[in-house]
Image: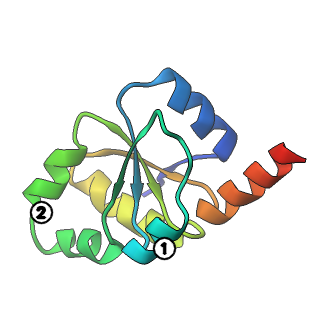
Amino acid sequence: MSIKKIDPETLIQKGKDMENLLLLDVRPRESYHTYKIDMKEVEQKQIAKEQIFRLEESNGEAIVSSLKGKEVVVVCTRGIAATKCAEILVEKGCDVQILEGGITAWKRYKEEMEN
């Protein structure tokens, strides 16, 4: 299964243009609160990857229904966990893509833009 990917520059543009965009950060809560993507105009949610992984065995209706009807961009540190989470969510009928390179790529892009 091939999951759609989005780069940081495109994510910023989508954030300006879309109302139904949701950033789903699957890193641990501590990591999320230490550093998260700074897009105030975009809804953000943190759900640990382990909760998403458990959706393979359960229907996880509350989680899945909170994501339906939105274009979801899954974020983790480098994109590896996000890919696995995205695969599970796509199977559950969600419109999902991942931030290519994760928070690491986001930070690099932001640093380049500041210089």
Tag 1's secondary structure?
Answer: helix
Q: How is the image coloured?
A: rainbow
Query: Total number of numbered labels?
Result: 2
Residue 7 image offset from top left, x and y in percent: 65, 46
Q: Earlier in the sequence, mark 2 or mark 1?
A: 1
Tag 2's secondary structure?
Answer: loop
Depth check, front residue: 18 or 1: 18
Q: Which mark is residue 31?
A: 1
The quarter of the rendered structure image containing the N terminus is bottom left
Residue 59 in the figure: left or right of residue 24: left
Residue type at numbered disc 1: Ser
Point 61% across, 36% down: residue: 12
Residue 65 in the figure: left or right of residue 8: left
Residue 33 in the figure: left or right of residue 91: right
Residue 11 image offset from top left, x and y in percent: 58, 39
Residue 28 visible within the image: no
Point 70% across, 59% down: residue: 107
Q: Nearer the viewer, mark 2 or mark 1?
A: 1
Point 76% across, 58% down: residue: 108
Outermost residue, top direction?
A: 17
Residue type at numbered disc 2: Gly
Residue 96, compared with residue 60, is above or below; it is above
Question: Which residue position holds label 2?
Answer: 60
Residue 58 in the figure: left or right of residue 77: left
